[in-house]
Image (cartoon, rainbow, N blue to C red):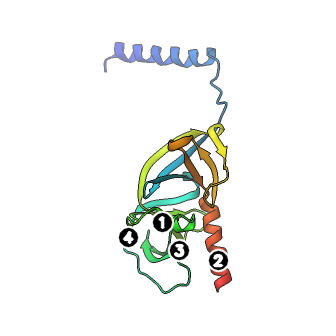
Amino acid sequence: MNETAIGLKHEELKRAFDRSFQEAPVERDHELAHLLVVRIGTARFALRVSDLAGLARAQSVMAVPAADSTLLGLAGLKGRLVAVYSLAAMIGSAALTTEPERWFVLCRAEDRIALAFTTAEGTMMVPSSELCPVSPGAPPHATDAIGTGGSQLWLLNVSSIAAAIVQSTERAG
């Protein structure tokens, strides 16, 4: 860059900086919820990204004898052993799919617990004001609904699911 170009760039940056103080500040009238959209069979659900410690493609799961039908087994994930539970079974929707669970999410609240599901479809940002309280017929651990009709997603509380798993293992042990 020559000196003339540098001088012009400097003036442009200075004007932009000065202009930023003249413009009204942008106020956000809502918070955004960052969600991971997952699929179990044909049903779609959402999980708060802030409740997750990680997302990974499913690893080999070693089945273990257990009275808990929601426990799929143990897997090595991120250098440690985690208990893998079926997300579909945890929300009472095991009949939704016969497809293999290809994805895991690690629970932030209980990082030794992974939830398995069919497909990770992507993430979305939703204004918190667009989250609606659950209605009758919502699956267990659903806290909110996003959208309506056929495009409605249930927002599942991963921390609540992890707490239910811990509570059931404490009762059993």
In the rendered structure, find residue 70 and report the number of the disc placed on it: 3
Q: Earlier in the sequence, mark 2 or mark 1?
A: 1
Residue 153 shown left or right of residue 98 in the figure: right
Residue type (three-letter) at the residue carrying disc 3: Thr
Image quarter of the C terminus: bottom right
Residue 93 sits above or below residue 72 on the image: above
Verify CB contact (< 8 Å) between mark 3 and mark 1: no
Secondary element under disc 2, as helix, strand or loop, is helix
Locate residue 107: give its quadrant.
Answer: bottom right
Residue indicated by mark 4: 59
Q: Is mark 3 on a helix, strand or loop?
A: loop
Q: Which of 150 and 104 is in front in this view?
A: 150
Tell which circle, 2 or 4, labels the residue nearer the N-terminal end: 4
**Dot 2 amino acid type:** Ser
Labels 2 & 4 near each other (Cβ < 8 A): no
Between marks 3 and 1, how big is the CA–CA gap? Answer: 12 Å
The residue carrying mark 1 is 95
User: Measured along the vertical axis of the image, is residue 57 above or below residue 65?
Assistant: above
Q: Is mark 1 on a helix, strand or loop?
A: helix
> In the picture, residue 26 is in which quadrant?
top right
Q: Do the residues labelled 4 and 3 touch (CB within 8 Å)?
A: no
